[in-house]
Image (tube, rainbow, N blue to C red):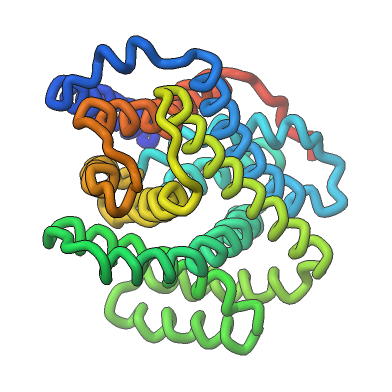
Amino acid sequence: MEKYLKYSLVALIFVFAALSLLAILTDALPLIKRVNPYFFALSALFFVLSIVFWIIPWALLLKNNRKLSLRSMLVIGFSCVYGALTPVQIGAEALRSIKAKDIFGISYSESISAAMVVKGLKFFMLALVASIVVWMVLWETKLSLVMLVGLLSGFSVIIFASALFLLPLDKKIGLMISKIFGELSNFWKKFSLLEKYFHDYSNYLEVLPKEKFFAVFLLAGLSILLEFVALLFSFFALEVFIDVFPLLFLFIIISILERTPFLPRGIGVVEAAGFIFLSLPEFSQLSLSVAQVGAILIVFDVVRLIIPTILSLAFSLIKVNPVKK
């Protein structure tokens, strides 16, 4: 856990430095100083709630008739959010599994399986909308090679992850995926861990009640909706009023690029793509100054990166008593 803590603190410092540089380059500081505190607070609140509704289905799946406090599980879940400052946000999932094992005695396999069900459904919903958005972006806009690679790699992660975590709903496919990783372990032994995981994951999905699956689907959808509303209020905080469809395009582009491999939360490419998008009146349907574009990106980065990370670090100080075996 110390490894993820150090990594996240370094990443947080990097975020502060990157946003400071963006503020200087775009001369956005005067606008940021005039940000509407009420709309900014609402934006932050909606984003934090989106995280809560991402954690709730994981907690509900793990309760599974166990006598566990939902409040304690939510505290544990939120205390691991700082681990999301890792590529594809994998650190948060790893931390939750470690803490669920240490505090609640829940196996790594079950905890990760529950997390992947939620992530798979969230990715599936994003993939449906993103497929339309990506096609329109590629059709209408000439992107630089870096932006193109970032967009397509992030989109590939969403498609691949949603398929990988939902196809095992058919146990035969799940076992086939497990077997493929078993064959790959002949070339790299660590693939044997994925072989075992997908074997266990297929068995987990086989006994997962359909009503719980539907509840997770609704909660994951609510989480995405709250993220979208948080982005909307980031615009309101700067007295910028954007139409729903351009905002949806921007939201999906951010959601895709956040999953860009090797970059924590897509830091760098998210801002670059957002700047390009918002600077094009034919796309954003707005005529924004460089300072306004910079201020919008900075405000939403504070909402999506800095505030949740700091809150998560604070939650990690809350002691949750281990369940007596």
**Measured along the vertical axis of the image, is residue 39 above or below residue 174?**
above
Q: Which quarter of the image is occupied by the C terminus?
A: top right
Q: In the image, is 323 to the left or to the right of 255?
A: right
The residue lying toward the viewer, choosing from 193 and 61, is: 61
In the figure, residue 7 lies in which quadrant? top left
The residue lying toward the viewer, choosing from 186 and 213, is: 213
In the figure, residue 25 lies in which quadrant? top left
Q: Position of residue 252 (x, y in %)?
A: 42, 55
In the figure, residue 295 lies in which quadrant? top left
Number of numbered discs present? 0
Q: Which quarter of the image is occupied by the N terminus?
A: top left
Could you tell me which residue is drawn at 86 percent across and 41 percent down?
Answer: 67
Could you tell me which residue is drawn at 35 percent across and 66 percent down?
Answer: 134
The residue lying toward the viewer, choosing from 273 and 69, is: 273
The residue lying toward the viewer, choosing from 251 and 118, is: 251
Q: Position of residue 139 (x, y in %)?
A: 27, 71
Could you tell me which residue is drawn at 64 percent across and 37 percent down?
Answer: 52
Q: Is residue 257 in view?
A: yes
Q: Position of residue 297 (x, y in %)?
A: 32, 33
**Measured along the vertical axis of the image, is residue 195 above or below residue 303?**
below
